[in-house]
Image (cartoon, rainbow, N blue to C red):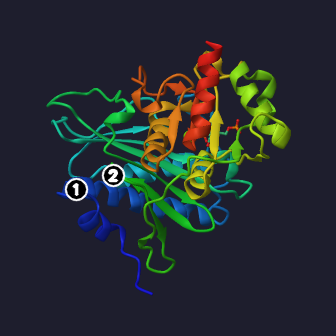
Amino acid sequence: MSEPITLRRFLTRYAEPGGLDPNLIFLIEDIASACRVIGNRLRNAAFEGNHGLAGDTNVQGEDQKKLDVIADEVFARICESSPRLAALVSEEREDAVWLKEPEGGDYLLFYDPLDGSSNIDVNLSVGSIFSICTVGTDGDRDVLKAGDAQHCSGYAIYGPTMMLVLTVGSGVYGFSCEYGTGDFRLTHPRMTIPAETSEFAINASRYRLWDAPVRRYVDECSAGMTGPCGRDFNMRWTASMVAEVHRILTRGGVFLYPVDDGNRAAGGKLRLLYEASPMALLVEQAGGAATDGHSRILDLQPTGHHQRVPVILGSANEVDRIAQYHTADA
Ligand code: AHM
Ligand code: MG
């Protein structure tokens, strides 16, 4: 069996006709290094006294775990010297961090350094999510980029195998971290999401808070063979978006974190720039769909760094069905 190619070889030789900008390759390699370090810090957290709360809240008023803070610092420290990186925009920081006077074509890096961190202490999979856009013109400090402006997005999943999954604008590729060398190697070329699925993921404890279209969808799935779908559905919920999206990229499914009576004032639960947009690009590139119920996620124009949105993504036929229920209810 031939050895799977490394991330560097993929980025330099296989990514796109015409090739990728070398500075984008450097940045993606820096992100991969940051994820490798975060993976090691997670693995050693019990020995380094890094489980539990940091004792602070982030910009969104959420309790930060020690590892949220560590992961954010690792991302910033490793990526900040990337040659054409103009700004870091982190879920954990109030404002964008400008590293240089922005010039047209410079890169902007958006990231959620440790998503699903409520799972750390119970030793379930967590991840890091990232997205890369470019500065429009010299001096332009606008970081409110719509999802369609992303050049690259991806995540690292810290599970039984550490993996990096990314798109550089065409197709989705998964790289497993080789124990010993630490190399990320292409083990999952062209990940695709089947249009049909019989598996959904939602935090069902919020049923009483949902709007009618979401209840209708889950009621129909739960009715199984005797319901309008005419088939049985399976349900999963890991409370870790990276793990949910990874499962959907592996075997299909649909993931919902809708707006509901508990999060309506905030606009939803998940952040547009750090979670919804990067995952929507991956899902579309794998043949799936992603909507907020009414609009394609990648069409949404952000109005603030930390804006939250409803998210419904995964197998296209199910996402379309849920969107139709929203339209019918409008
Ligand atoms: P986080 O960025 O604070 O970790 O929150 C995002 C996470 C997602 O990974 C996951 O889908 C969701 O929050 C879980 O929410 P819940 O606690 O309602 O299950
Ligand atoms: Mg998050």
Q: Quadrant of residue 143?
A: top left
Say the numbered circle drawn on residue 168: 2
Asked if one can make out residue 136 in the rendered structure from this viewpoint, the answer is yes
For the residue pair 266 and 15, the one nearer the viewer reads as 15
- CB contact under 8 Å: marks 2 and 1: yes
Q: Within 10 angstroms of label 1, few (less than 14), some, or many (20 or more) residues? A: some
- The Cα–Cα distance between marks 2 and 1, rounded to whole angstroms, is 9 Å
* Amino acid at dot 2: Val
Q: Is residue 23 above or below residue 315?
A: below
Q: Which residue is painted at 60% across and 25% down in the image? A: 324
Location of ligand 1 given as a quarter of the image: top right
Which SS class for mark 2?
A: loop
Q: Quarter of the image for the N terminus: give it.
A: bottom left
- Residue 12: numbered disc: none
Residue that badge 1 annotates: 20
Mark 2 CB within 8 Å of ligand 2 = no
Viewer-proximal residue among 294 and 35: 294
Q: Relative to residue 188, is residue 311 depicted above or below?
A: above
Q: Is residue 57 left or right of residue 145?
A: right
Horizontal side, residue 153 vs residue 324: left or right: left
Residue in the image at 58% along x and 60% along y? 158
In the image, taking residue 84 as reference, residue 216 lies left or right, namely right
Badge 1 marks a residue whose secondary structure is: loop
Residue at 16% in and 30% down: 137
Q: Residue at the far top: name it.
A: 330
Of residues 198 and 21, the one nearer the viewer is: 198
What residue lies at 67% left-to-right and 63% top-to-bottom?
A: 46
Q: Quadrant of the C terminus?
A: top right
Q: Quadrant of residue 55?
A: top right
Looking at the rendered structure, the kind of residue marked 1 is Leu
Give the x, y percent position of residue 247: 61, 55
**2 or 1: tag closer to the N-terminus:** 1
